[in-house]
Image (cartoon, grey):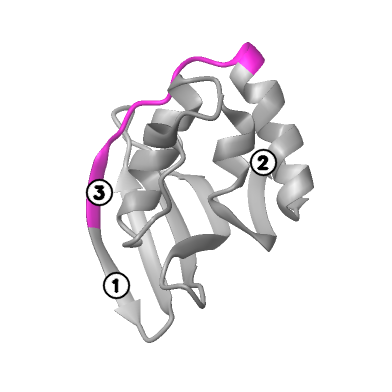
Amino acid sequence: MNDDATRMPARDPQDLARLLVARQQAGDAEGMAALYAPDAILDIGSGQLARGRDAIRAFYAKLVMAGPKFELGDQRPAMINGDLALTSTRLPNGTVTVEIARRQGDGTWLWVIDQPSILP
């Protein structure tokens, strides 16, 4: 999927979660991975990390094929310090996500660390 509406860049760190959910619901694993920096890490459970955008893309490709659709939860306001931002969302099932985003040279934001499921 390469719809302009789902491939808009994150101009604010708060945009990242909304864009991730929209792209997952559209089945766009490539677009999901594009929200991460090339050197990002994603906790994929059981003590495993997806390292780098290619590994993150592969993980999301499997998830899109097999998993339920994501839902946007209650986003907490981003904590921004210079070019870094801490983002967090309480999902409808009660789990909490925690991510660190980095501002890019063009002013957009990409996640560099993603811990998608923390116990409530």
Residue placed farthest to the front in the image?
4
The type of residue carrying mark 3 is Gln
In this picture, is 2 found above or below 82? Answer: above
* Spot occupied by residue 4 in the image (x, y as percentages of width and height): 43, 35
Residue drawn 43% across the image and 56% down it:
98
Q: Nearer the viewer, residue 97 or 41?
A: 41
Q: CA distance from mark 3 to mark 2?
A: 21 Å
* Spot occupied by residue 68 in the image (x, y as percentages of width and height): 49, 14
* Spot occupied by residue 87 in the image (x, y as percentages of width and height): 36, 60
Q: Is residue 32 magenta?
A: no
Residue at image mark 1: 79
Q: Nearer the viewer, residue 103 or 95?
A: 103
Disc nearer the start of the sequence (2/1): 2
Which quadrant of the view contains residue 107? bottom left
Residue at image mark 2: 44
Q: Is residue 70 magenta?
A: yes
Residue at image mark 3: 75
Disc nearer the start of the sequence (3/2): 2
Local secondary structure at mark 2? strand
* Spot occupied by residue 26 in the image (x, y as percentages of width and height): 47, 20
Quadrant of the drawing holding the C terminus? top left
Local secondary structure at mark 1? strand
Horizontal arrangement in the rendering, residue 17 relative to residue 54 (left or right): left
Circle 1 crowding by C-alpha within 10 Å: few under 14, some 14–19, many from 20: some
Q: Which residues are magenta?
A: 65-76
